[in-house]
Image (cartoon, grey):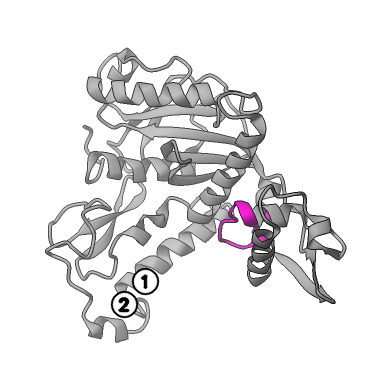
Amino acid sequence: MSDGVPGDAEFGFELVTCRWAERAWPPEPDRETDAVPVVARQLGTRNRRWDTVVVEADPAGLAARAAFGERALDSDLLHVVRHAPAEWAWYRDALPEPGYPWRYVRAAVHRAADRDVVETRRAGNRIEIRRIAPYPDWIRRIVAIENKPDLSASAARRLGDQMDHDVTTALADEVWVATAATGEAVEPALLEDLPVEAGVLVLDFDGDDPDARVAWHPAALDPSADTSLSAETKAGKRLELAERAYGDGWRSYVETMRPDCRWFELRSESGALVPWCAAAECHQTAGECSGSCPEFQPEPPSWRTRGWPIEGGPGKGIRRLLARRRRRVRAFDPEA
């Protein structure tokens, strides 16, 4: 593997790939677009999870989406927000038939009001709702990427079945395999038994920033067609995926690790801030960085009283830093 891929082959490669996509998507130099890439990791459905998801967002639509807050809207909240009327109306008159008991819709209305994504008022015994703004059509395309830095023959066989499922289902507009450059005349990924509809992206990490090359162009899939999932079902799942990408981003890895450990640091690798364990002197994985780690030590209390720039302790400072970068990306700052 090329120097510069930090830590575990999968986890470190995933983080730097996400950062590259945030800065440089799309990889095809001949495709002009003003879409804003919203990048997330480890997203999918009950039956399929992707390493990296790129939502190509309409700039105006993405700006309008900000009116509904930074957190993702789940399917129940989307049902309320997307159909909330411009004028006050009883929620059961305003919203389409949900296909499940109305008491769950009523609970979603209360949650939506608590998050200030709709307005509510009482009219006698009835709850009336009114939208705060039209929910925008902000999603242009969804791209799924599988990250395999070292694509061995056995890994390719497993991945081939998964990508056949992706192509057949057509939930995403494109599917890709991202792999690390080997320097060979023909990249090994091109010799493996992968579906021809899947693109192959080769990333070289020898410099400060990854250099990406399209080794095989993907075919355009049609999410509007009925496949093993109906077009209507896919439209709903795509919106939920995009919302989760918007809310989580790819920096959410810190939420499943222990930045409050005294040994936890962030180091810059290939343009991304990647976790570093000062005790083990390596880039740890999310699975390794937990309270059960034998090297885990909580931050000393004195660290949490030093004030700026680590007010609350370095762990909380790391969380604030990554959250701030996530917000800046939503505001279209390429240097976030």
Disc 2/disc 1 C-alpha distance (Å): 6 Å
Residue for point 17% across, 52% down: 282
Q: Is residue 116 located in the magenta-colored stretch of the structure?
A: no
Q: Quadrant of residue 239?
A: top right
**Crowding at label 1, few (<14), some or many (≥20) Cα neighbours within 10 Å?**
some
The relative height of residue 212 versus residue 110 in the rendered view (above or below) is above
Residue for point 43% across, 21% down: 164
Residue 75 image offset from top left, x and y in percent: 61, 51
Asked whether residue 199 is in view, the answer is no
Residue type at numbered disc 2: Gly
Can you tell which mark lies on residue 313? Answer: 2
Q: Is residue 67 located in the magenta-colored stretch of the structure?
A: yes
Q: Quadrant of residue 214?
A: top left
Can you tell which mark lies on residue 110? Answer: none
Q: Which residue is mark 1?
A: 317
Q: In the image, is 233 to the left or to the right of 293?
A: right
Residue 318 image offset from top left, x and y in percent: 35, 66
The relative height of residue 236 versus residue 199 in the rendered view (above or below) is below
- Which quadrant: the N terminus? top left
Residue type at numbered disc 1: Gly
Residue 5 image offset from top left, x and y in percent: 26, 40
Asked whether residue 99 is in view, the answer is yes
Q: In the image, is 315 to the left or to the right of 229?
A: left
Q: Are marks 2 and 1 in contact (CB under 8 Å)?
A: yes
Q: Which residues are magenta?
A: 65-76
Q: Secondary structure at mark 2?
A: loop
